[in-house]
Amino acid sequence: MLQKREKVLLLRTFQGRTLRIVREHYLRPSVPCNSPLCPQPATCRNDGKLLSSEVTHYMIPDWKVVQDYLEILEFPELKGIIFMQTACQTVQHQRGRRQYNKLRNLLRDARHDCILFANEFQQFCYLPRERGESMEKWQTRSIYNAAVWYYHHCQDRMPIVMVTEDEEAIQQYGSETEGVFVISFKNYLDNFWPDLKAARELCDSILQSRRERENESQESHGKEYAEHLPLEVLEAGIKSGRYIQGILNVNKHRAQIEAFVRLQGASCKDSGLASDILIHGMKARNRSIHGDVVVVELLPKNEWKGRTTALCENDSDDKASGDPPSEPMPTGRVVGILQKNWRDYVVTFPSKEEVQSQGKNAQKILVTPWDYRIPKIRISTQQAETLQDFRVVVRIDSWESTSVYPNGHFVRVLGRIGDLEGEIATILVENSISVVPFSEAQMCEMPVNTPGNPWKVSPEEERERQDLRKTHLVFSIDPKGCEDVDDTLSVRTLDNGHLELGVHIADVTHFVAPNSYIDIEARTRATTYYLADRRYDMLPSKLSADLCSLLGGVDRYAVSVIWELDKTSYEIKKVWYGRTIIRSAYKLFYEAAQELLDGNFNIVNDIPEFRDLDEKTRQARLEELAWAIGKLTDIARHVRAKRDCCGALELEGVEVRVQLDEKKNIHDLIPKQPLEVHETVAECMILANHWVAKKIWESFPHQALLRQHPPPHQEFFSELRECAKAKGFFIDTRSNKTLADSLDNANDPNDPIVNRLLRSMATQAMSNALYFSTGSCAEEEFHHYGLALDKYTHFTSPIRRYSDIIVHRLLMAAIAKDKKMEIKDNLFSNKDLEELCRHINNRNRAAQHSQKQSTELFQCMYFKDKDPENEERCISDGVIYSIRTNGVLLFIPRFGIKGAAYLKNKDGLVISCGPDGRSEWKPGSLQRFQNKITSTTTGGESVTFHLFDHVTVRISVQASRCHSDTIRLEIISSKPYMSPDTELFHQSSLLLKSDLVKEVTRSVEEAQLAQEVKVNVIQEDYQKYCQTKGRSLYMLLEEIRDLALLDVSNSYGM
Ligand SMILES: [Zn+2]
């Protein structure tokens, strides 16, 4: 029987109106207690995770302890923790989604001995709030009451320690109930966990920062910022349209001044605003931090401001900002924060001299975050001097209205400033990528495969699966040196004359059971991370490079999609999905496959599978394989032509491919003109992804994981159109079809870079492709714009993408459903799947950002400490691809670098070029036109730079202590660069990018050898952070088209 309770909240709004908010909830006689000591487990329905029976006591943290010390409660050494619902809810309301999700993950994590107790739904635990009782007191009282109930429920057999920060509660409840102890958290750690040094230190650090905060708010009277409005007022205001909700996005080039709020949820449709809202200045930002979900009030129109259009550098006292801002746009101020998205931040401590100048509050230090968008943070520490040469992780605790800066505490040291490993660790933390080695518990789930005890196909699986080993010629085509083969192909003629095409994908979900340790880890990582010089795998190499990898000549489990096609029209007659056993006959690399396709059979000596055959067999097999590749290519051409009719896009970025040798060194880059066989493989994968998407959506219309690519905003195309016009091309952006066609036509026969830049601009105008749950949006929104398909998903790379693992499980469930069999795995509900999609999308962005940032790190290391005046590498050709009021944006084809070059320097001088093109700085002025910019000196000389002009550029590095170094570009001549080896210009820019990574890595290693002490540190770091040590600038073939849709390098302070 359920009893209904009502919680009534009375709130006063701004205008003095009173809002009455009623929340209902239902009480039950029993809720799961999840204790192994439970006297009636059936009544309690304890079917989830249970507390360990190996503990001496249960620990119940009070709400404030959960809020402030969650990172300590996460220590796996702490066992027997009961989180009360009351405490969890305050975390949700006070600390935001990120923190709340951390708590939920902790509760789900089988390795961590803790449970949730829904005390507010338990009829004997629930306490109504008394008149005049504060929320805080009521929460503590509720938790204590539940602790006492729990103690008696377990028949007084397990002592309970309630941990609270409330002194009064310790006094009042400390000796009230025998067996239920109430003490402070510090007291708890000191007495129960004297050996857990790390936890106790972290506790001290948090306590100290809090004490100082309290002292300070007593001292200071002046308010720096307006108070935030209460949650209920914010919610009511959003509903009524008075306030607008969105995500705060700080402009990293003007972090002190400019932030934008991108509208979210209902605000997006209802506000009638077409653009973002500008938040001008720190006061109006009102303590919100980049990424927070904020509530904004619009200012009256006469107070609106424009965004800055000039190029600018990152220092705040920027002299170049005398330019008039653009037209006024909706401008507002933050009145409250709905969700704080605080994360771990990497910071740099001030140098010794700076500390001294910070003066009187010497143990309170202002540290500078690596991310420009995050404000300085105040840290209480006595270690400022020892930490000054290191990158350090801190967390923000609070930001009071009385304080200019947020307060935070020190967490850990990452590494020395400027060291490769320290900088890579910085990039990882900044993208919230955690890649500790796989644990013993996770590795224990791996199947055995040793020389003495090799893995074999099991008889049960042999019965269940379609066996293709004797009937199908299966082979893979991958980059040279690829270890993790996700996908293989087959094609043959059937007895009825039809063709049969097969795509066979590694059966990862056979080895990775839902909610196993490995599954949870893979879900958390969501993807394999590829940095410029290394990668972090999503799955242990035992699976990714061995048992799941569809290597040649060994039996492997696969999930197959097999189509029957008409032999001439290639029309699809039938499709079959299911689990199979395959043995791949050939593990081909792209060049070899292309040679076979071209009828050049000399390549056969490079294919190991052909080596030990007699001439006759070899010839027969060769012909068989060449026929298959040819047939596949024919089919792919046909499928591609069909998509092309619907407007599939080919965008810049497609040709990024890297080849590795056996030792995983970058061996070579695949030539810029992609081989047709790349297309063949990619097209087959797109086809499989498309058909699997249709299948899982038909079977589970409200809970299938698909991938959408929304059409781009037309206004983002205006720059592309203008640029093309400058070269006399017309870009029709009305549909993906017209865009694709007009991009194909926009080709300057004298300069291939023009087309490349236009495609790259089109890419930047695109929205990102995203995963979503089909229950969360209307069918017409499923469309994939870039691929011109109505339904699309990711199925073909389960070794390196978690989305594909989910899709495999959905496909298996769909097959079971067709056969009217029981669906074994629990599928995600629409809501849970949507949340998972958000997580995976977020991790993909992190993967892309970290890849880009690590590439930039290598670029800077390549040019750092080189003399830009004399070194050959520092001078290069550059192409202008955008005009700004005080400079131009340049693309350096040789290194693949994009960046800004100023035409007006800090002293207000402008560029002037003599007859030979050489530049100098002179007094004068700039005049910007649509497609060109002219610099005129007071002496009357003038020079004009047009879009797509080639100029000579000097590349140097602007070093920064607190942030990443950046590449600086300077136009040294208005003429194109004539290098001794001009043909470089026509080669792939990335050819040199890979050399660049190699050279930097080598010089870093040499430097390490010179300092033996350092080497140990580095190796330790490797163990800590890397699963695979290798230089793999490796990118995924079948995803390239899709990946190219996101270019994160799009802003230079525009
Ligand atoms: Zn129970």
Image: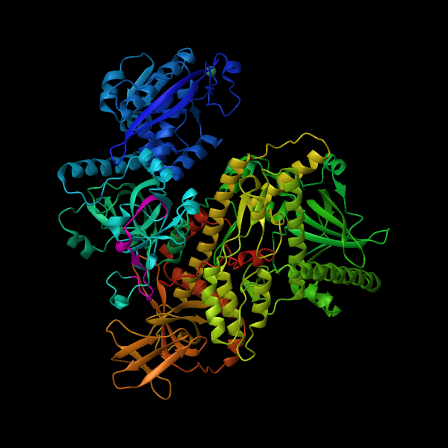
The answer to if 293 sits in the magenta stretch is: yes
x and y percentages locating residue 667 in the rendered image: 56, 65
The answer to if 709 sits in the magenta stretch is: no
Task: Give, as a single range, the part of the protein colored magenta.
Answer: 291-314
Measuring 29% from the left and 55% from the top, which residue is drawn there? 304
Does residue 725 sit above or below 291 in this rendering? below
Q: Quadrant of residue 592?
A: bottom right
Q: Quadrant of residue 618?
A: bottom right
925 sits to left or right of 769: left
In which quadrant is the C terminus drawn?
bottom left
Measuring 50% from the left and 25% from the top, which residue is drawn there? 49
Colour scheme employed for the rendering of this structure: rainbow
x and y percentages locating residue 127 in the rendered image: 34, 17
Please tell me which residue lies in front, 972 or 258.
258
Please tell me which residue lies in front, 717 or 861.
717
Does residue 345 sit above or below 1006 in this rendering? above
100 sits to left or right of 280: right
x and y percentages locating residue 721 in the rendered image: 48, 68
Measuring 45% from the left and 83% from the top, which residue is drawn there? 978
Does residue 872 sit above or below 224 in this rendering? below
- From where the camera sits, is residue 397 visible? yes
Q: How many marks?
A: 0
x and y percentages locating residue 640 in the rendered image: 67, 60
Please tell me which residue lies in front, 624 or 971.
971
Please tell me which residue lies in front, 765 or 372.
765
- From where the camera sits, is residue 540 visible? no
